[in-house]
Image (spheres, helix red, strand yellow):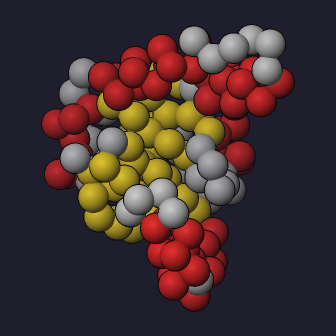
Amino acid sequence: MFIGEFHHVVDDKGRLAVPIKFRDAFKKGAVVTRGLDQCLFVFSMEEWKKLAEKLANLPLSQQDSRAFARLMLAGAMDLELDKQGRVILPEYLRTYAKVSKLAVVAGLYNRLEIWDESVWEAYRLRTEQDAVGIAERMSQLGI
């Protein structure tokens, strides 16, 4: 289970240190892809296979199904930890998420999200300001 918020530096080669507490989950590999809300999603190989299978089974006749599958699958890239526990984030994904020098790695149960620090701070502030409204809407989903 991934939880927590961690601030890290992305070096000039696009390398980002994975928080130590998450590294074991990625020993068998990981996948990074375009996320939602201008971030990147990182899945363990096990979680990625579950998601990819669901995406592959979406109806081809529905435009939103095709678009979402393309967003997630076409943009995906395998990741491997180096000896220092870092991964290389492809340039096209860093550009998509506007990840520059300072990044936030957020644990969200079955995935990590990687954000540019300034984008994360703006998102976090907006979300905190609407926390009551969000909670009310989530109650409609049984949460």
Question: In the rendered view, would you say 28 is above or below 121?
Answer: above
Residue 17 appearing in the image = no
Left or right of 142 in this view: 29: left
The residue that appears at 46% across and 25% down in the rendered structure is 51
Left or right of 5 in this view: 70: right
The residue that appears at 57% across and 88% down in the rendered structure is 129
Q: Nearer the viewer, residue 26 or 2?
A: 2
Q: Position of residue 50 (x, y in %)?
A: 39, 21
Question: In the rendered view, would you say 53 is above or below 76?
Answer: above
Q: Nearer the viewer, residue 98 or 125?
A: 125
Left or right of 123 in this view: 54: left
Number of numbered discs present? 0
The residue that appears at 27% across and 58% down in the rendered structure is 3
Question: In the rendered view, would you say 111 is above or below 123?
Answer: above
Instruction: Please tell me in which quadrant of the rendered image residue 143 appears.
Output: bottom left
Q: Position of residue 29 (x, y in %)?
A: 32, 24
Q: Nearer the viewer, residue 124 or 27?
A: 124
Q: Position of residue 40 (x, y in %)?
A: 55, 46
The residue that appears at 39% across and 48% down in the rendered structure is 112
Residue 45 appearing in the image = yes
Instruction: Please tell me in which quadrant of the rendered image residue 92 appears.
Output: top right
Q: Position of residue 122 (x, y in %)?
A: 63, 78
